[in-house]
DNA sequence: TTTTATGTATAAGAAAATTATGTATATATT
DNA sequence: AATATATACATAATTTTCTTATACATAAAA
């Protein structure tokens, strides 16, 4: 299965991360897992084994910047979008939205989006 | 990343196949690829390398039955849902719909579904 | 005092796709 | 007539992305 140019339906985690960072400025890993759980009412649980490698990869690709902080003696790594990251977020979000619409059309053509 | 009980967002191909067969009674592999392409306006292209193994697996799981036909001297394998397949389709579709709603909430909370 | 929550990280394995082939016939194009 | 494209199925090799398990460490709650 493929979507236009991308392995999107698989890599939606990356897009979710980018979208949240775009919305909220900066977040740390654990915060992202909790926010996603909250926004999806527990439906979607990001595992650490998926999250941290994804963050590291996005950073290596130059889409994220890191900033280390110490809060209550515990380590936090705040991530935020770079300029390249902001541009890429627009593209990936668009692709993800198209994917979602396609899935809707397949699964339930009666749904309408407004 | 996980969704409730399932590896769904990954396995959406299986659900798409089940849904189409549920709707249309019986279909053969190539027909499925073309139908999905049509329904998604070219957005979603199922590759043979993904499709045929998926069909074989669904058959092995007892969710599909096969019927071989020869049309214009060319082979066709028509697949249709078994009884177990029909039951399973209901569950998987429900899970996929929930997944789509969650993704919508994440990506675009302003969308409403009716 | 032990469990739960917070916080990051990585290695091993599984799942599901892509890409690249292979076989074969029918139809359309040059 | 020759070649390319569409139809039709299939599988092996590889890649991507996830889950599961483990590891370390501090704070708060039971």
Image (tube, coloured by chain):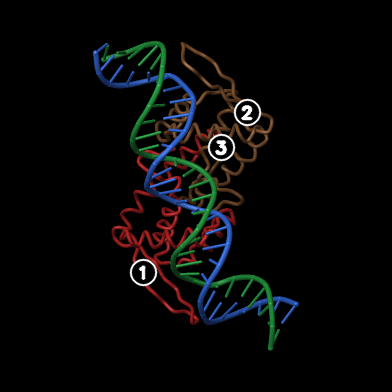
Chain colours: A brown, B red, C blue, D green
Are tags 1 and 3 found on a single chain? no
Occupied quadrant, residue A90: top right
Whether label 1 touches label 2, CB < 8 Å: no
Disc nearer the start of the sequence (2/3): 3
Q: Chain of mark 1?
A: B
Residue at figure coordinates x 60%, y 52% from the top left? A4
> Which residue was labeled with disc 2?
A81
Q: Chain of mark 2?
A: A
Q: Is residue A100 visible?
A: no
> Which residue was labeled with disc 1?
B66
Above or below residue C13? Residue B39 is below
- How far apart are the alpha carbons under marks 1 and 3? 38 Å
Crowd rating for badge 3 (residues with CA inside 10 Å; few <14, some 14–19, many 20+) = many
SS at badge 3: helix
> Which residue was labeled with disc 3?
A15
Q: How many marks?
A: 3
Above or below residue A64? Residue B17 is below
- How far apart are the alpha carbons under marks 2 and 3? 12 Å
């Amino acid at each position: 299965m493929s979507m236009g140019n991308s392995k999107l339906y698989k890599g939606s985690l990356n897009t979710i991360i980018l979208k949240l960072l775009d919305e909220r400025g900066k977040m740390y890993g654990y915060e992202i897992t909790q926010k996603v759980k909250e926004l999806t009412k527990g439906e979607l649980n990001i595992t650490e084994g998926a999250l941290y490698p994804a963050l590291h990869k996005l950073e290596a690709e130059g889409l994220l910047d890191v900033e280390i902080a110490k809060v209550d003696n515990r380590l936090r790594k705040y991530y935020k979008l770079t300029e390249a990251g902001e541009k890429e977020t627009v593209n990936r979000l668009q692709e993800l939205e198209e994917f979602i619409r396609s899935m809707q059309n397949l699964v339930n053509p009666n749904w309408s989006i407004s």
